[in-house]
Amino acid sequence: MGAMIIISTYPDRKSVLKTANVVVQKQLAACVNFTKINSVYIWKDKMEKTEEFLVFFKTTSTSSSPLKIEIKKLHPYKVPEIAEIKIRSINKSYFDWLVQSTRRNKSQK
């Protein structure tokens, strides 16, 4: 089992908080961090320049799949970014807290 960060972008603070509250409450993510960013991309053949929120969902490899399903279910975008980053190195005390904070891992202890 390892630590993971799932990354996504959201259009507004309200939609971030809705998803964050659900996934932390369900113990699929131990913590959710977010910050406002500026994005430039092409959508439907048109150049877009928007403010979005970049969101980091901190979880374990065991909980990453159900977390991604929940993010997709709650996400307001038609084509949401849901990218997974595997953590190669993490301090033990934080990892222990991460494991204790996710539902999937509690049931396996």
Image: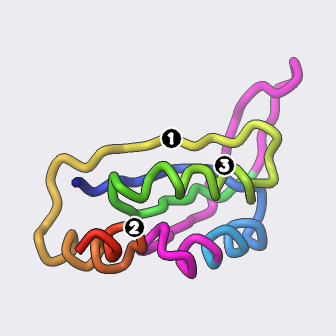
Task: Identify the residue position indicated by label 2 in the image.
Answer: 104
Mark nearer the N terminus (1 vs 2)? 1
Number of callouts: 3
Please say if 82 is above or below 35: above
Which label was assigned to residue 63? none
Task: Identify the residue position indicated by label 3 in the image.
Answer: 38
Q: Which residues are magenta?
A: 22-50
Q: CA distance from mark 3 to mark 2?
A: 34 Å
- State yes or no: residue 27 in magenta: yes
Mark nearer the N terminus (3 vs 2)? 3
Q: Mark 3, mark 2: which one is toward the viewer? A: 2
Q: Secondary structure at mark 1?
A: strand
Task: Identify the residue position indicated by label 1 in the image.
Answer: 83
Mark nearer the N terminus (1 vs 3)? 3
Three-letter amino acid code at the position of disc 1 = Ala
Q: Main secondary structure of the magenta part?
A: strand
Please say if 20 is above or below 76: below
Quadrant for the C terminus, please: bottom left
Name the residue: 40% across, 54% down. 5
Residue 40 in percent (x, y) is at 70, 35
Q: Secondary structure at mark 3?
A: strand
Residue 72 in percent (x, y) is at 68, 49
